[in-house]
Structure formats: C-alpha cells, structure tokens
Amino acid sequence: MTVRIYHNPRCSKSRQTLKLIQEADIELEVIEYLDSPPSTRELSQILTKLGIAPRELMRKGESIYKELGLAKRELSRKEALQLLHEHPKLIERPIVVKGDRAVLGRPPENVLGLL
C-alpha cells in the first residue's frame, strides 16, 4: 500500500519524517502541499483519518493565522477547510497517510506506527 506524505522540503521535521519513510523502503507518494494544496474534500478526508478538527491542523504561529485574525474568529468546518486550502502555509506538517489512517509527523517518529 502506498504511503502519501504532505511534505514541505523547507521544514526539518518534514525532511526527517520523509527520511524515515524512505528508509522503510515502501511505496511512497510525496506531495509538496505548498505547490499543490489539497482540495477541501481531500482535507476533510485527511482530518477524518487524523481524528481531529480543522482548527487543530492549523499552524497558529504562522503570520497568515495572525493576519486573518483566526484566533478570534469562529469558523465552520467548511470555512476552516477553505482557509486551509487557500492558505496551505496554515497546514501543520508533515501529514502521512496510509489507507484509512493518518498521522502528523511531529515528532517524526509518530510515523513509525503507521508503517
């Protein structure tokens, strides 16, 4: 079964997670999500697999989070998914998906249980 990683090559945790997967020598699909943001539907499926709400996937330290005033805004699931799609820098990384399960690679060792 193919493992998919939503990867940011500039992120050290993402690079470390990718290396762990590559060392496991399994079929891998790398998606550089800043260049190819997941659709709102795909994000919804990922969140279901992670078992978290959209806001839990948001990087609260990003400047765009502050610029949009997201800490003070109530968001519907649909609105949050749209924001994550439109502003992929908000997406916590890396996300690793295998079948009907997903994990955040923070710390990178989280991925080992999925492999």
Image: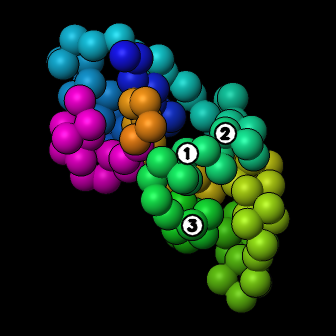
**Residue range (magenta):** 102-115
How crowded pointer 3 is (Cα within 10 Å; few <14, some 14-19, many 20+) is rated as: some
Residue 104 x, y percent position in the rendering? 38, 49
Which quarter of the rendering shows the N terminus? top left
> Reading the chain from its start, which is encountered first: label 3 or label 2?
2
**Can you tell which mark lies on residue 46?**
1
Dot 2: element: helix
Residue 58 x, y percent position in the rendering? 57, 63
Q: Three-letter amino acid code at disc 3?
A: Ala
Name the residue: 48% across, 48% down.
49
- Corner quadrant of residue 39: top right
Q: CA distance from mark 3 to mark 1?
A: 10 Å
Q: Is residue 100 left or right of residue 108?
A: right
Q: Label 3, on which residue?
A: 53
Q: Three-letter amino acid code at disc 2?
A: Glu
Q: Label 2, on which residue?
A: 42
Q: Three-letter amino acid code at disc 1?
A: Ile
**Can you tell which mark lies on residue 93?**
none
Q: Is residue 52 above or below residue 9?
A: below
Depth order, front residue of 109/26: 26
